Amino acid sequence: MGALHAGHISLITAAKGQNRLVVASIFVNPTQFNNPSDLKHYPRTESADVVLLEAAGCDVVFMPEVEEMYPSAHKGHWDYGILSSSLEGHYRPGHFDGVLTIVKRLFEAVEPDLAYFGEKDFQQLSHIQRFVREEMPSIKIVGCPTMREEDGLAMSSRNLRLTPEQRQTATIISKILYDMLEKKNDFAPSELEMYGRTQFELTHGIELEYLEIVDAKTFAPVPDWDDLFDPIILVAAYVGEIRLIDNMRVI
């Protein structure tokens, strides 16, 4: 959605390594915003974005207007059970319908062979993978690792909206996640969740929305550390008015 950073450019780099032609889309998608203020204040840096994409070797930049992608206000609806109803789906109802609507239309316009998405938006990536398996199986989805700043903060376009003080506070999110990983062997999954939530409650300047440990394949809660599960910690928190998300696999 623009306001590109090194995380986005890593997707271009991955795509350049596997394809003859790389296309990037920049489109701030209105149908995936629940909060009108968030849409209004979402950072837009199109000129700088194009310069970054060109330097990274991107061949084509697709920057459609809203009217082109949405000749009507209609958006689709997808229900993938707990994947759609939990976490982001619970706190941002309709968000994934907006995401999949625009992804479907972009895929129809570009007709890619492979499409690259970051794992920071892990639940979004899971939706896109499910959607493509069922409706556009000729496309292969490639998940790319979350890119982090030197201090551990997950790269995000919304980081541009943080004040210097908030930017420092935001680093606590990844610090708590790393701390939870170190303490995995001391707690059961539900206990580790509670430990992480408590650390957020003790942190000034951050308001936790959710923190859960789920199975990365099913999004069901993880009852124990059995090898049958692929646990991942998913978190959303507010620093001031800025909503940030992050995740880490439990290994």
Image (cartoon, rainbow, N blue to C red):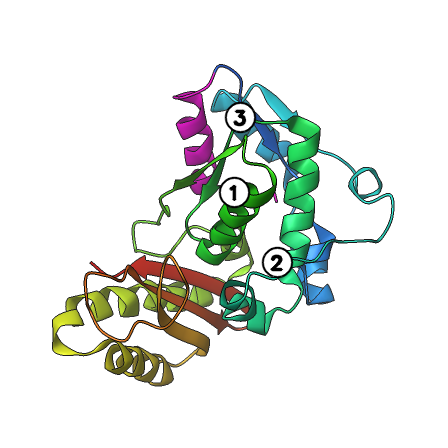
Marks 2/3 in contact by CB < 8 Å: the verdict is no
In the rendered image, the quadrant that contains the C terminus is bottom left
Query: What residue did someone put label 3 on?
Result: 113
Please identify, in this view, whether the residue under mark 2 or under mark 1 is nearer the observer: 1
Q: Which residues are magenta?
A: 1-19
Q: Which residue is at a point 27% across and 76% down the rendered structure image?
A: 223
Helix, strand, or loop for circle 2? helix
Q: Quadrant of residue 153?
A: bottom left
Q: Going by the picture, which residue comes out furthest to the right?
A: 72
Query: What residue did someone put label 1 on?
Result: 133
Residue 202 % position (x, y) = 33, 85
Helix, strand, or loop for circle 3? loop
Query: What residue did someone put label 2 on?
Result: 96
Q: How many tags in the picture?
A: 3
Q: Is residue 189 magenta?
A: no
* 172 sits left or right of 54 in the view: left
Helix, strand, or loop for circle 1? helix
Residue 237 % position (x, y) = 46, 71
Q: Which residue is at a point 72% across and 58% down the rendered structure image?
A: 40
Q: Which residue is at a point 87% across and 43% down the rendered structure image?
A: 71
* 94 over 55 or under it: above or below: below
Q: Nearer the viewer, residue 243 or 145?
A: 145
Q: Which residue is at a point 70% across and 39% down the rendered structure image?
A: 105
* 98 over 234 or under it: above or below: above
- Residue type, numbered disc 2: Phe
Please identify, in this view, whether the residue under mark 1 or under mark 3 is nearer the observer: 1
Q: Nearer the viewer, residue 81 or 115?
A: 81
Give the mark nearest the N terminus, 2 or 1: 2
